[in-house]
Amino acid sequence: MDNHLQILESPNNRYRLKPHEIELIKESRAKNERRKLIIPDLHAPFVEPGFFEHCKAMYRKWNCNSVHFTGDLLDNSFSSFHEITPDGKSAGDELALAIEQIKPFWEEWNEATVCIGNHDAIISRKLVSSGLSQAWLKDFNDVLGTPGWIWKDKFVEDGVMYIHGTGSSGRNGAINRAINWNTKICQGHIHTESSIIYHANKDSLLWSMQLGAAFDVNSYAANYAKNFTKKPIIAVGIIIDNGRLPILEPMPL
């Protein structure tokens, strides 16, 4: 048994793993399987303090070997299509801080897949509304200093569709998409919902994983929601056994 598993099986292990969770990790190590850490909407530079550490801890706990971001890595509050806070940071300052917050994620996982979210796409949309060609737009990796990350609108791996979630809403947004598209779905976008829902039809067993956001509700970018009764659910997703089993890991507040 390796040292890490000895630590996990110790009664003093800091992850407080249940016996069946330890067995799942043992089984996953015995197989050549993909075990994904799913990181929800960051909205940098307004990332919840301590969230990066939570991501690292869950990656290690579940012995993950790949990472996926659900999108909206950037908030782009300065260029929002909604009302903009006049006392917020300038475009340059906000981007510089966003790059600073994203840097530790890239340093920890320099290979990852990122779904392009609606907030990530704000600058691209502003080019269109200004009548400018997309040829003027720099690559995300060039702007953020994240070479090796792959940015896509959506992709499928192990029978799971990974997508940001634009166009979905409400508690059943993700499972409705799974049913309509007849595929397993993993998405973010809906900040105040985080759930795993199963659905069976005569041909298949489907599930949806809805992740919330790592959005700091105390930031000025969240002023629009200060009177909302529901707040973002800060959690990461884990998908193990080559897309078979989804798991939610909320961050302790």
Image (cartoon, rainbow, N blue to C red):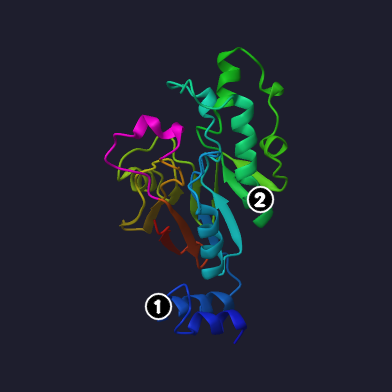
10 Å crowding of disc 2: few (<14), some (14-19), many (20+): some
Q: Is residue 20 left or right of residue 79?
A: left
Q: Quadrant of residue 195?
A: bottom left
- Say which quadrant the N terminus sits in: bottom right
Q: Is residue 167 magenta?
A: no
Q: Amino acid at mark 1?
A: Lys
- Say which quadrant the C terminus sits in: bottom left
State the residue position of label 2. 106
Q: Is residue 14 visible?
A: yes
Residue 163 drawn above or below residue 128: below
Residue occupying image coordinates x 37% and y 29%:
224
Q: Is residue 227 left or right of residue 3?
A: left
How far across and how far down the image is residue 15, in percent? 46, 72
Residue 64 drawn above or below residue 40: below
How far across and how far down the image is residue 85, in percent? 46, 23
Residue 242 drawn above or below residue 29: above
10 Å crowding of disc 1: few (<14), some (14-19), many (20+): few
State the residue position of label 1. 18
Q: Amino acid at mark 2?
A: Trp
How far across and how far down the image is residue 58, in percent? 51, 64
Sooner in the amino-acid sequence: mark 2 or mark 1: 1
SS category of the residue bearing label 2: helix
Q: Main secondary structure of the magenta part?
A: loop
Residue 228 drawn above or below residue 102: above
Q: Which residues are magenta?
A: 218-233
Furthest residue to the bottom?
A: 1
